[in-house]
Amino acid sequence: MLHRVRNEGAPSGPCERAQVTAARRVWVEYCGAMDTEYFHRWMYLLLARLEPGEQVLARGRAFEPSDVLRFDLSRVISGPGCAVAVTERCVLWVSRDDDRWVRSLPFALVRSYAEITQAHRYALALDHESIERLQSVAAHQLLWWSWGNAEAAHSVTSTVLAFSRRDTKAARAIRSRLPRPY
């Protein structure tokens, strides 16, 4: 079992200093392994959806806001986000270990898009033809109260994908496949 190392004053000798440094290194390696493990599982889900012969232009991480009408880029970009794969014909992303939650948006369905920037944070707001998408909803509702977790397929016409920066490989690949504004 790993524990965080607390800094309560400087280590008194070389042996104690080496123990603290080694414990920090193990903690960072452990957290890093956990970080890439779920990302690789998600990327595997995306790559399993590709058509035969379809090539991936870019892979990366993005963030999908829960409410596309009211979101703040400074709050969207936190946590594990989504794994994203961009191909010649579509963008795919997933944020859960379940194949049902893989989202796909063919570039042929995109009607228009807007680029949103706040400091170094960046998002693409894509307006597209109506597609069915699985979403989390409340299991029960009475007047204005709602509770519980359920899933339902909803028709959506807009998608927002946020990135940590404008120049990430996935963001550049998506922009390169979108129709140029007139």
Image: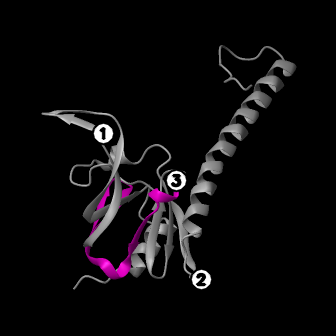
Q: Which residue is mark 2?
A: 52
Q: Residue at x 76, y 17 (%)?
A: 11
Where residue 90 appears, as percent x and y from the top left, is 43, 76
Q: CA distance from mark 2 to mark 3?
A: 22 Å
Q: Is residue 124 visible?
A: no
Q: CA distance from mark 1 to mark 3?
A: 19 Å
Question: Is residue 115 placed above or below 120 in the rendered structure?
Answer: below
Q: Residue at x 34, y 45 (%)?
A: 74
Give the quarter of the figure containing the N terminus. Answer: top right
Query: Which label number is shown at residue 139?
Result: 1
Q: CA distance from mark 2 to mark 1?
A: 38 Å
Query: Element at badge 2?
Result: loop
Q: Residues within 10 Å of mark 1 (few under 14, many from 20)?
A: few
Q: Which residue is mark 3?
A: 98
Where residue 67 appears, as percent x and y from the top left, is 27, 50
Part of the protein shown in magenta: 99-127
